[in-house]
Structures are given as structure tokens and as C-alpha cells.
Image: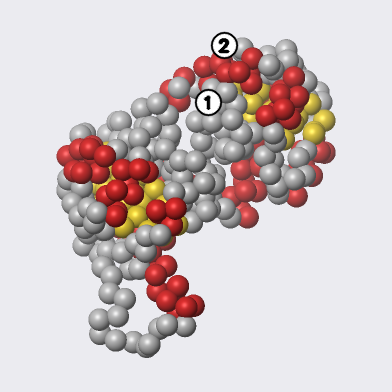
Amino acid sequence: MPKLSNPKVVVTRELTDAVMHRMAELFDASLNHRDQSMTRAELETAVADCDVLVPTVTDTIDASLIEKAGSRLKLIANFGAGVNHIDLKAARARGIIVTNTPGVLTEDTADMTMALILSVPRRLAEGEKLVRSGQWKGWSPGGMLGHRIGGKALGIIGMGRIGQAVAQRARAFGLSIHYHNRHRLPAVLEAQLAATWHENLDEMLAQIDIVTIHTPRNADSEKLIDRRRIALMRPHVYLINASRGGIVDEEALVEALEAGKLAGAGLDVWTFEPVIDPRLLALPNVVMTPHMGSATYEGRAATGERVITNIRMWADGHRPPDQVLEGWI
């Protein structure tokens, strides 16, 4: 791989000041100083004349956009771990390397997941709204009753870095850990987490009290939690999703929540962000946060540093450390 002394880098979204300043120092950087996504036309202009594109999850880097890329574009250095918004096959066909930033947001996302696991059964959002409304009449024995999470069974779908970090936190709250993953964890790690593997997802869903999703969004996971699988869960189950919208069939989820076939949900991601089904907005037993699972100053800084490392390694003629390989496709 030849060296490139001063690659032209286009950043599609406004990042933290420190990250953007560092990129301007190191590269021939074209920075987006607006806190909004580039338009399709702007993306087409960008890919036509740059060496490196730095997109975010809000950019759709599909086959038709990649087809419009100029011969210079050889690296798509994604700002974030998920790459379901990038057509990896189309990039590979054009000889374009795709990188991501795995691991840097693990703890932040696990913290947010644990917050949702606590918030929904204990009705924290409902209680906060009641206090702000001015309608709270004071403590009473039957007021704002929720459910304790200690002693409940947590089902984790996807036991990668984030799933394991959630399991560690959940154990401290007295939850028993169950998980479904494509591959079983090594026995020593399973023992450390006191986790029970379920090869069959349907079997696990029928046994747990809270389910949380931590699998990438791809062709295999699209609407993984559909109407049939929701029907397998017992009515007292809470569903948590801080992974990606689209993994849960939102129409089926709304129907189950409205019919009392699920006890509640904690959602940080949506299928058609930022549009949210108004029926979900009307449900008191749904805690909703605006895709903020990774939103920490520390996490954003670490993500930017990882992007810069990938670009520098590539520009120096080396394989970037976070190249996304075929297993993601």
C-alpha cells in the first residue's frame, strides 16, 4: 500500500472541537461545521474528490453513492462502531477499505443500557413527569409501585463487548444472566459472568424477565424481534434496545405494549430516526432517550482519536487496525 503524505479527508458531520482541530493539523481536511448531516448532493460532491471519507451513522453510504466516488477515494473511516449504513460489498468491489471504531463506546453504551433496565421497571420516567406536573400528592403505600430487578432473569441478545459489559453490571444488581449469541463464549468467560448460553433464541425469550439487544444491525438481525418472537415473551417482560433501530419490529412492539402483552420498553434507538411512532410517545410504560447511549465527552473524543489513527496508519502505507472485514457483511 503506497504512502500518502497529505490525504484529502472529508468529514461529513460536526465533531468535537479537539478532534476537528487535530484533523485539520494532520490532513488536508474539509470539515463540516454544521450540526446536521450533509445532503445527498453534498455527499456525492465529497466522494468525487477525496481520499478519505469520514461518515457517521446518519449518512447513507450506499452502492449508488459509492459508484459516484472518484478514483481517489480509498478509505471510508467511519466515526462509530456500527457500519450498517455503509454498503460494504460495494466498497469492497471498488477497492475501498472501510474502518470503524470498535470498543471505545462499550462502557458508555452499557451504562445507558443499565439505566434503562432500572428506569422502566421502577417507572422512573413516569415518576419524574408526575413531580414536574405538580399533581403529586405526596408519598403513599400504593404510589408509583414498580418492580424490583434483583432476582429477575436478564436475556442478552448479542454477547460481544457491550453485551458482556452489561452482564457485569447486571450481576451486581442481582440479575441472573442468560444470553444468545452466534458463538458460545469460552467456558472461563461464561463462568466469570455466571452466564447461561441459549443456542436457540426462541427458547431464551420464553424464559427471561428482561431482554436487552446488543447485536449489530444487518440482514440477519433486521426485525429479529418480530411479532412471532414478541409473542413468545411473557406479559411481564421488559424489552430494552440501545443497539440499532430496525432490529425490533416497531409495529409489533406497539401492538404488544398497547395490548398489555409486554410490561414496558426502554428505547434509545428507532427504525426511522428521528421520526418516532406517536403511539409509542403516548405510552407511559415506555422510556425513550434520543440515541444517546454513546453520548459522553470521553466517548466522542476516543472515537475521533480512533478515526485519526485509522487514517494515519492507512496514509503511512499500513493496514488500518480497525478495518471491517467480511464477517460484517
Neighbor class of circle 2 (other Cα within 10 Å; few <14, some 14-19, many 20+) is few
Quadrant that contains the C terminus? top left
Residue 49 visible, this angle: yes
Q: Position of residue 316 (x, y in %)?
A: 72, 23
Which residue corresponds to mark 1?
324
Q: Is residue 260 shown above or below 195?
A: below
Q: Residue at x 21, y 34 (%)?
A: 199
Label 2 residue SS: helix
Upstream in sequence: badge 2 or badge 1: 2
Q: Residue at x 64, y 21 (%)?
A: 65
Q: Is residue 134 shown above or below 230?
A: below
Q: Residue at x 21, y 62 (%)?
A: 151
Q: Residue at x 79, y 26 (%)?
A: 8
Judge from the rendering whether residue 280 lies leftward or rightward of residue 321; answer left or right. left
Query: Which quadrant holds residue 197?
Result: top left
**Label of residue 189 in the image:** none
Q: How is the image coloured?
A: secondary structure
Query: Which quadrant holds residue 327?
Result: top left
Q: Is residue 90 shown above or below 22?
A: above
Q: Position of residue 29 (x, y in %)?
A: 80, 33
Q: Amino acid at mark 1?
A: Val
Q: Amino acid at mark 2?
A: Ala
Judge from the rendering whether residue 195 lies leftward or rightward of residue 249; answer left or right. left
* Figure disc tally: 2
**Label of residue 93 in the image:** 2
Residue 110 visible, this angle: no
Front of the two marks 2 and 1: 2
Spatial CA span between label 2 and label 1: 14 Å
